[in-house]
Amino acid sequence: MRQGGSFGRRAASTVVLVLVACLWLGPYAWMTLTSFKSLPEIVEAPLAPFPRAFQLDAYREVVRAVPLVRLFAVTVGMAVTIALLQMALALPAGYALAKLRFTGKKAAFALVLACLLIPAQVTFVPVFAMLGEVGLVNTFAALVLPFAVSAFGTFLVRQALLQVPDEIIEAARMDGASELTIVYRILAPMLRPTLAALFVFSFVFHYNDYFWPLVMTTDDRVRTLPLAIALLREQGAGVRWHIVMAGNVVLSLPVLAVFAAAQRHLLRAVTAR
Amino acid sequence: MRPRHPLHPYLFLLPTFVTLGVFFVVPLGIAIKNSFYSWDMLTPPRWVGGANYAAVVRSGELTGILGRTAGYSVLVVVASLTLGLALAVALDRPGRVYAFVRGAVFSAYVVSWVAVALLWMWLLDADAGIVGGVVRAFGGRATSWLARPDRALFAVAIVSVWKITGYAMVIFLAGLQDVPRSVLEAAALDGAGPFRRFWEVTWPLLRPSAAFVATTSLLASFQAFDVVRVMTQGGPVKATTLFVYAIYEHVFVNLRVGRASALTVVFFAVLLGATALQLMAWRATAAKRAARPEAS
């Protein structure tokens, strides 16, 4: 590196770029190319780079095998509902924790932080039994309610509210605004970057989630898209990879679109900045 | 600030605490209780004392799970951290091409574990997979990685590294923004080569980011489930039965809630221990930073 002048360094960084692009974009490219192949092509020449003709057979097969519209409705509906509930409930809680004086405030904040330590992987067995007793297994509520509150989101909102000067709240009170108006009409718009980060992060996480819908559903009433796509592989005799890859494209495209459109917000949540 | 009504703060926190209580705190308590019972979810639970714990210890099941999960996690964290750091340094440049490649690496972190797991099963397919094709093209012998007990966990770990390297990369990229250009330029003027500049200027400032990445991805790797469920179902011969998958299998395949709960309690204790380590690491780096104010 040291003896390399500007040419050597440029060549080295080009090599890195190409290598990285191949390692991370190559698999996506292979997935997409495979999804346009037909079954005989997969069997005869699995390594041929391009399909003989771009066929939509695999996608047709996916549409035939799974109720795509309903899966999308359930999955997107679930992820959006969770993200909205988390925002709506984190705002008043964060307001109380950041701005109001009351006995037990420190303990309340500590309890929120403590809940960050309890992952769903620890609670799912009792929650499954509990929801079973009240007949909520295989319902939309079983997918949404346990995540209506995010300890992480409450923490983020509280931290952001600490930066808002008290004078704004005092002035609003003077003008006769109710506390709920202050929280949802005055403070919420000021927290737009934080709330956007929380929304996108939460949406992507729950859209992708496989674990919770898997353990909370025993039939296909509220099955989500990741579950249905994973099942594509297990169905039928022999694995028809072109169909599985078509399903994979269908599963990944929406979330990649969200990523492309809202990368900024997502990065803010991930890097906690 | 004084609340307008003394009850307001409690009312504002009520929905949050009811939800966290019902779905996190109480279930944790129930899991601990269940670990002392034998229960198949069909007949009433029966008190067995510490028998569940004794069973998972004596059968060697717990040691196996702990070893596999720790091995997988350490491999994933070390590899993704190293690779993520290298990529962050290499790709921290202006220009659309670099932005696109950074986005490509991070996109793997954004798509579902299910999509990544299925994609790599196809890439690693013994007969028709492209990885085997490339290996054969270079004269090597392709084996079915996921079907071999001695390779499966390694293969799952490699796939996980591919998925989460983008996470480490973006944290390091954020950390790199705190490295002052002027200091790097001054070091370059003083004749420090790129490696010296990295070790003596950049790396000390990136250490907090490294601690953050290491601890958060360690906790996340310990909770890995999706990738195992989709790619290997814990097999072959338990080779990839990580902690959460073992718990899942006890509940939904063997209908042994007691055993599963005993494993859950141990799992939670390990997570708590890891978090305590994380807090200690953060305090230590924060103290170091405070001791050297010129660095930040």
Image (cartoon, rainbow, N blue to C red):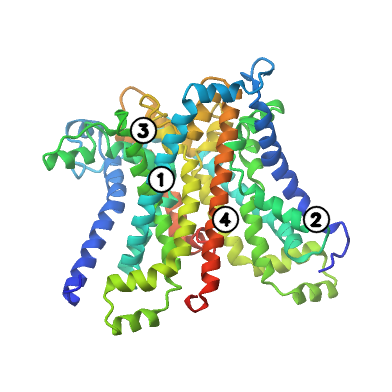
Q: Are marks 2 and 3 in contact (CB under 8 Å)?
A: no
Q: B235 above or below B276?
A: above
Classify residue A131 as left or right of residue B168: right
Q: What's the CA distance linking mark 2 and mark 1? A: 39 Å
Q: Does the image show residue A145?
A: yes
Q: Amino acid at mark 4?
A: Leu
Which secondary structure lies at badge 1?
Answer: helix
Q: Nearer the viewer, mark 1 or mark 3?
A: 1
Q: Amino acid at mark 2?
A: Gly
Q: Nearer the viewer, mark 2 or mark 1?
A: 1
User: Mark 2, residues whose alpha carbon is within 10 Å: few (<14), some, or many (≥20)?
Assistant: few
Q: Amino acid at mark 1?
A: Val
Residue under pointer 1: B74
Q: What's the CA distance linking mark 4 and mark 2? A: 24 Å
Chain letter of the residue carrying label 4: B
Image point (54%, 51%), residue name? B277
User: Mark 1, residues whose alpha carbon is within 10 Å: few (<14), some, or many (≥20)?
Assistant: some
Residue A248 pos. (x, y %): 38, 41
Chain letter of the residue carrying label 3: A
Residue under pointer 2: A104
